[in-house]
Image (cartoon, rainbow, N blue to C red):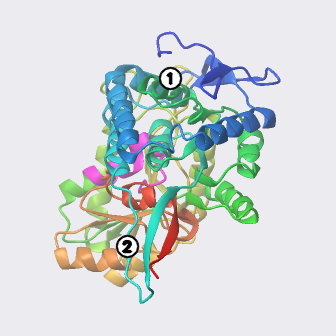
Amino acid sequence: MTTFEIEPGRLFIGGQWREAADGARTEVVDPSRGAVVTTVAEAGAADVDAAVRAARKAYDDGSWSGLSGRERGRVLHRVAELIRESADDIARLESLDVGKPITLAHAVDVTNAANDYEHFAALAHSLHGSHRDTPMNALAYTRREPLGVVAAITPFNFPLILAGSKIAPALAAGNTVVHKPADETPLSALYMAELFQRAGVPDGVVNVVTGAGPVAGEALLRHSGVDKIAFTGSTAVGRHAASVAGENLKPVTMELGGNAAHIVFEDADLEQAVGAIIKAFVFNSGQFCMGGPRLLVARSVYSTLLGILEQAVPGVPLGDPRQPETVVGPMAGEKHLKKVEEYVELARKEGGRIVCGGERLDLDGGYYYKPTVIADLPNDSRVVQEEIFGPVLTVQPFDSEDEAVRLANSTPYGLASGVQTSNLARAHRVADRLQAGIVWVNDWAMLDPAVPFGGVKDSGFGREYGPEALASYTKVKSVVVSLG
């Protein structure tokens, strides 16, 4: 399958391609043109059950869990190599499916996905327990063992990366996986199923079921054969997923919504800060849970920075994602575009001043929205407090460090935050006080698979990336051997 000849997608279960049990299919739309590009199978409960059973069989037969970490690592290294070898096709596919600018899909999505598998391949053979010294006349030690079958449920905005952030550590630890990608953007998940097979991942170890969240996703959440749920998505759906997991006492990783604050102090390098500010709210058309849609600016530089943004933001290249110079592409779907329009209209009603943007871009029937900067909104505005998930930036002034921290922490979310300052002591001091899973200083979205990320408060719990993620896909067993 390539972006040049996109075949209708089927379910990948037990190493075999198959149609949904009831033959149901759903359309996949190119958001840059609003046109249907293909269809994929729409899984039902019976299909999910077949996928979980295939994953359980593969886990129980030891074809993957029974390998040494080093052997699993070799296969995951091959997955990374195949991603890099197929980089052009994958980037074009992700751009077509999500509306990502092709240059960014290549440089960010494909590169980071390959890095994910490479990183966890290296960690796979470093997974170990430890000896425990006790007063007992016994040898006591712990083992790290895989959990079993992992349900990986991923969203529409970064299909390739967010699948890898779950599947790579799950496989490195010896688990098997059933992946349910977003119904809007399933194409890279199906492409990756082929790559896993080519890399030597045994049949049944990775299964892909495409379909609607309320049907396929719900069946996967509730399936008794699933041992862990790894979910990225909205806070509302995450609450439901966590409650279902709680009913069945299943471990979960929840990476949920965000509404990050980006703080600019008076001593910041404004030229450097502006680049980070724009990147933080227009990247991926603002469809980025770790984006920075709330800008907090020291009052002494507030007017100056607003003026710079008013001039700079309209110059960010917006348009056809297939063009290499494009930086901002379309929203991923019409419903996402309408949501942004509703929030901007609400901002107008609440007294917000539209500094720039504030309207659709009519281009080829696609779902484009101009990057928008809004000033003069009160902190209790819904537009400030809620997650818009689009290319919209609200700007608020502050008069002290304490006020900046208070405003930054004033929403229910806590996924990311940022600080722009030339004062190193202030950077550490403010980072310590911010309620967020990751804090960036003097840049934005500096991400690497070695660095864990995840949320606090309504942004979820558990961590993706790093050894912390690998540990979350294992269980600890204690072994105590009497020496008497």
Q: Quadrant of residue 168?
A: top left
42 relative to 481, above or below:
above
Q: Nearer the viewer, mark 2 or mark 1?
A: 2
- Estimate the spatial distance between the alpha carbons at disc 2 and disc 1, rounded to whole Å: 41 Å
Specify the farthest residue to the top: 5
89 relative to 349, above or below:
above
Residue 156 x/y as whole percent: 56, 39
The amino acid on which the numbered mark 1 sits, given as a three-letter code, is Glu
In the rendered image, residue 291 lying in the magenta stretch gets the answer: yes
Q: Is residue 209 visible?
A: yes
x 76%, y 64%: residue? 247
Q: Which residue is mark 2?
A: 131
Q: Quadrant of residue 185?
A: top right
Magenta segment's dominant SS is helix
The residue range painted magenta reads 275-293
Q: Is residue 155 visible?
A: no
157 relative to 85, above or below:
below
